[in-house]
Amino acid sequence: MSRKKKNIVYSTNTNFNYEYDGDKEQATLPPNDQTLYVHFEKKHRAGKKVTLVERFVGTELDLKNLASLLKKKCGVGGSAKDGIAIIQGDHCDKVKEILRGEGYEVKG
């Protein structure tokens, strides 16, 4: 997440600490309390086809771990950023099956 300074341009106080927007990450909800949206996309990616997993509620580390699990089970590459897990290729059905097996509710 980007850390943007909040409402301060300059301070002469040597003990001043900046306040940052988005400094606190939300705790990861258990899988049975989350609804993830899985869909296929090929626009805006230079014609490459990807499967997106959106609306994950939790820390970036947990999202990266989930994306890693999906990549391993699908046998493809991908990434996790901005709250979205990106899996290379059209693997919607397989990703949905894996997520349901992990206890997530899946839509899309």
Image: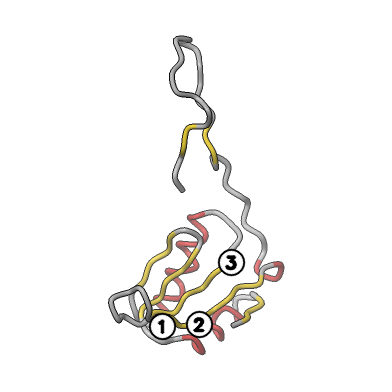
* Amino acid carrying mark 3 in the image: Arg
Residue at horizontal 38 percent and vertical 78 percent from the top: 43
* Amino acid carrying mark 2 in the image: Val
Q: Which residue is mark 2?
A: 95
Circles 1, 3 touching at the beta carbon (< 8 Å): no
Looking at the image, is 27 positioned above or below residue 77?
A: above
Residue at horizontal 38 percent and vertical 81 percent from the top: 42
Q: CA distance from mark 1 to mark 2?
A: 8 Å
Q: Residue 1: image x %, image y %?
A: 46, 48
* Picture disc at residue 55: 3
Q: Residue 23: image x %, image y %?
A: 54, 39
Q: Which residue is mark 1?
A: 74
N-term mark: 1 or 3: 3
Outermost residue to the bottom: 93
Element marked by disc 1: helix
Outermost residue to the top: 13
Q: CA distance from mark 2 to mark 3?
A: 15 Å
N-term mark: 2 or 3: 3
